[in-house]
Image: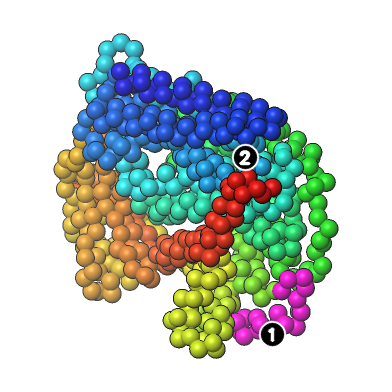
């Protein structure tokens, strides 16, 4: 009964999205706001409908109704309650339903919030949003139905959730990625609405920038949490391997980041209108492509847990939206041109443009490496995988250039800047960074690539801190205390200084990435009980292994290791292997000692009781790894500062919306 009701609700949501698309066109053609309002109500209604469908599926998971195939595939009787709930996005069909729910939530919020101040765009925004919703709900209704039943005998128990998805991090990581992906639909919706309507003023840009920032924040969180999950669960000593699914999330993040930078130029100088439109459209299309990669199983990945025959449907939808987008860009191309031109290569406009070129360079290289297995198989009938060395070799120098621009760009002025002025501003930070590099050389660091990266990070870090210092000093001259000056600087310049906080976060992350990439130490050894291993300043002594049952169908083998640092006892590590007996799938869970300087990271590869309690361990010493996570936290804080609405601006916007809404009643135009 619940499953049938769930499927019926999905069908109603599908029909509601179709109605919204059709009626929005009628409303636009007749210029009748009643039709448009009806279309909006239908588009908004998909959210409570999909919320109900998701709630019904969660109910089936909690009840353990194994007559439903999806419940059987991703759940079991002994699974903890929280895992049964998160199993909603633990498989293909449920994940697509959850995707639809979030997309509907974003759509409903955008349609309701922007109804008054973006009313001319609304019929077209509803149309474009509904087209996307129709496709994704259609997948759930007719291809990947999470409410379909198992024919014949009902199983006594389910297969259980994929062990890799049982980590607590997976409670947060997939929703953050889904929120980022679905959130990027809204900027595309308003961009296309502006193209179709021909209303290419600054209205759609203001709306699009805020939604892009929100989606970008969620996608950034998803990437950071995904890195942490890989570090904690996959047991290979790292956090980013240029895996296809990692890349599928990273690529739209790059284009979205480029847009957030270049949109400032359009707001300030009315330039790059066509370029910004391209970036918004590209981000949406790359989201669809990324979903295709993750959900189709067309490229093998340790992060991909769903394979089906939906690949051709995704490919067809992607092709359709490319044609749709290109048509309207070409149709409105003359209106996307601007009279303002780049006046100097030493200007803020040029710095942001160079920044965009670097982002797009990284994007193209990453996209090529990700799709190359498909391309090679298509033309040679052999699937050739592109590994991390390619990405590191190509993208590494581009990231260094990006970090350099991060420090120099704030020094530039609008229109044109003086080379002498910029030179004076960077000379002391450059010298200070050089002193730091000299000290590192004195400590024995001789990798020129690492030294160059650390010089750039230090140089840009100093310049970014100087921007904060200059702002605080300017306010202190008005009589404010240092803390009041700093607080007011953040509160009244949220967009600018939030951006600087983001830059600080990226630079701190870069410091950790350089340290963990260039100076990681690794060894693998087989030890008997009582034997020891030394790596760096650490000594690890193997005390033995115990075996015991865990929750559900889990069998755990856990090693006990005593750890000393420079002869000082610093505790015990317990790396383990987990075997899920129902599926026969093993898991390797590392254990680590973590400090601000480094992680001592241990994996138990295997254990043989028949060989006098011997075990094989893989051990990593990861310098500065925790700076990556600390930088990620700063990054998120900076994004929240930048995205947080200014009270004064919100009052002005609310007043404008009220004037628009009351205009007819007051006799206005």
Q: Is residue 440 above or below residue 570?
A: below
Q: Is residue 131 above or below residue 644?
A: above
Where does the image place residue 264, in percent across and percent down from the top left? 66, 61
Q: CA distance from mark 2 to mark 1?
A: 50 Å
Q: Which of the 4 image quarters holds residue 521? A: bottom left
Q: State left or right for residue 271 relative to residue 214.
A: right
Give the mark nearer the N terminus: 2 vs 1. Answer: 2
Residue 541 x/y as whole percent: 23, 62
**Callouts 2 and 1 close, C-beta under 8 Å:** no
**Residue under numbered circle 1:** 424
Q: Position of residue 289 (x, y in %)?
A: 59, 38
> Crowdedness of circle 2 by 10 Å Cα count: few (<14), some, many (20+)?
many
Q: Nearer the viewer, residue 558 or 243?
A: 243
Closest to the camera, between mark 2 and mark 1, is 2
Residue toward you, 100 or 523: 100
492 left or right, relative to 226: right
- Dot 1, how many residues are within 10 Å of its Cα: few (below 14), some (14-19), or many (20+)? few
Which of the numbered marks, if any, corresponds to residue 494?
A: none
**Residue at the image position 23 percent from the left and 74 percent from the top:** 568
Q: Which residue is mark 2?
A: 122
Residue 275 visible: no
Q: Secondary structure at mark 1?
A: helix
Per the image, is 426 magenta?
yes
Task: Give the colour scheme shown.
Answer: rainbow
Residue at 81% across, 55% down: 338
Q: Is residue 603 visible?
A: yes
The residue under the point 45% across, 63% down is: 637
The picture places residue 196, in percent across and down from the top left corner, at 72, 38
Q: Main secondary structure of the magenta part?
A: helix
- Residues rendered magenta in the picture: 413-433
């Amino acid at each position: 009964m619940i499953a049938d009701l769930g499927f019926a609700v999905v069908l109603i949501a599908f029909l509601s999205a179709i109605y919204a698309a059709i009626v929005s066109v009628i409303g636009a053609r007749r210029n009748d706001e009643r039709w448009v309002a009806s279309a909006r109500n239908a588009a908004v209604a998909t959210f409570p409908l999909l919320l109900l469908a998701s709630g019904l599926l969660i109910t089936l998971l909690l009840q353990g109704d194994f007559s439903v195939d999806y419940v059987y595939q991703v759940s079991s009787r002994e699974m903890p309650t929280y895992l049964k709930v998160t199993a909603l996005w633990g498989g293909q069909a449920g994940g697509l339903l959850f995707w639809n729910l979030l997309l509907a939530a974003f759509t409903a919020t955008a349609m309701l919030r922007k109804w008054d101040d973006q009313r001319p765009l609304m019929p077209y925004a509803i149309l474009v949003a509904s087209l996307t919703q129709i496709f994704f709900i259609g997948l759930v209704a007719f291809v990947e139905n999470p409410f379909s039943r198992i024919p014949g005998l009902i199983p006594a128990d389910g297969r259980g959730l994929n062990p890799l998805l049982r980590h607590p991090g997976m409670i947060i990581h997939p929703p953050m990625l889904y929120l980022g992906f679905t959130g990027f639909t809204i900027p595309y919706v308003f961009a296309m609405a502006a193209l179709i309507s021909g209303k290419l003023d600054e209205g759609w840009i203001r709306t699009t920038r805020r939604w892009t920032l929100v989606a970008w924040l969620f996608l950034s969180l998803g990437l950071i949490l995904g890195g942490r999950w890989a570090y904690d669960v996959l047991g290979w000593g790292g956090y980013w391997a240029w895996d296809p699914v990692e890349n599928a999330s990273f690529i739209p993040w790059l284009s979205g980041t480029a847009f957030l930078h270049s949109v400032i130029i359009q707001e300030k100088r009315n330039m790059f209108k066509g370029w910004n439109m391209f970036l918004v459209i590209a981000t949406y299309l790359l989201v669809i492509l990324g979903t295709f990669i993750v959900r189709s199983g067309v490229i093998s990945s340790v992060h991909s847990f769903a394979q089906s025959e939906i690949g051709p449907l995704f490919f067809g939808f992607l092709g359709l939206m490319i044609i749709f987008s290109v048509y309207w860009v070409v149709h409105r191309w003359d209106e996307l041109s601007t009279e303002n031109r780049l006046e100097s290569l030493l200007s803020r406009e040029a710095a942001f443009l160079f920044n965009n070129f670097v982002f797009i360079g990284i994007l193209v290289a990453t996209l090529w490496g990700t799709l190359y297995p498909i391309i090679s198989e298509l033309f040679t009938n052999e699937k050739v995988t592109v590994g991390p060395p390619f990405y590191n070799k190509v993208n590494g120098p581009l990231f260094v250039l990006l970090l350099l621009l991060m420090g120099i760009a704030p020094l530039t002025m609008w229109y044109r800047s003086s080379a002498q002025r910029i030179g004076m501003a960077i000379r002391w930070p450059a010298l200070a960074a050089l002193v730091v590099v000299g000290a590192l050389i004195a400590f024995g660091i001789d990798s020129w690539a690492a030294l160059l990266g650390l010089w750039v990070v230090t140089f840009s870090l100093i310049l970014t801190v100087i921007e904060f210092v200059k702002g605080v000093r300017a306010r202190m001259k008005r009589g404010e205390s240092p803390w009041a000056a700093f607080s007011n600087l953040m509160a009244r310049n949220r967009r600018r200084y939030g951006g600087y906080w983001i830059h600080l976060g990226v630079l701190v992350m870069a410091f950790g990435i350089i340290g963990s990439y260039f100076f990681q130490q690794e060894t693998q050894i087989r030890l008997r009980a009582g034997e020891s291993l030394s790596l760096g300043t650490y000594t690890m002594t193997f005390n033995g292994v115990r075996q015991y049952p865990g929750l559900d169908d889990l069998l755990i083998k856990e090693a006990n290791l005593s750890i000393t640092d420079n002869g000082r006892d610093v505790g015990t590590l317990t790396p383990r292997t987990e075997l899920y007996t129902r599926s026969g799938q093993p898991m390797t869970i590392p254990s680590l000692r973590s400090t601000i300087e480094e992680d001592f990271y241990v994996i138990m590869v295997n254990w043989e009781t028949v060989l006098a309690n011997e075990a094989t361990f893989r051990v990593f010493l990861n310098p500065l790894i925790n700076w990556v996570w600390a930088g990620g936290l700063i990054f998120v804080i900076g994004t929240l500062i930048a995205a947080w609405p200014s009270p004064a601006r919100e009052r002005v916007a609310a007043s404008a919306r009220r004037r628009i809404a009351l205009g007819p009643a007051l006799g206005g135009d």
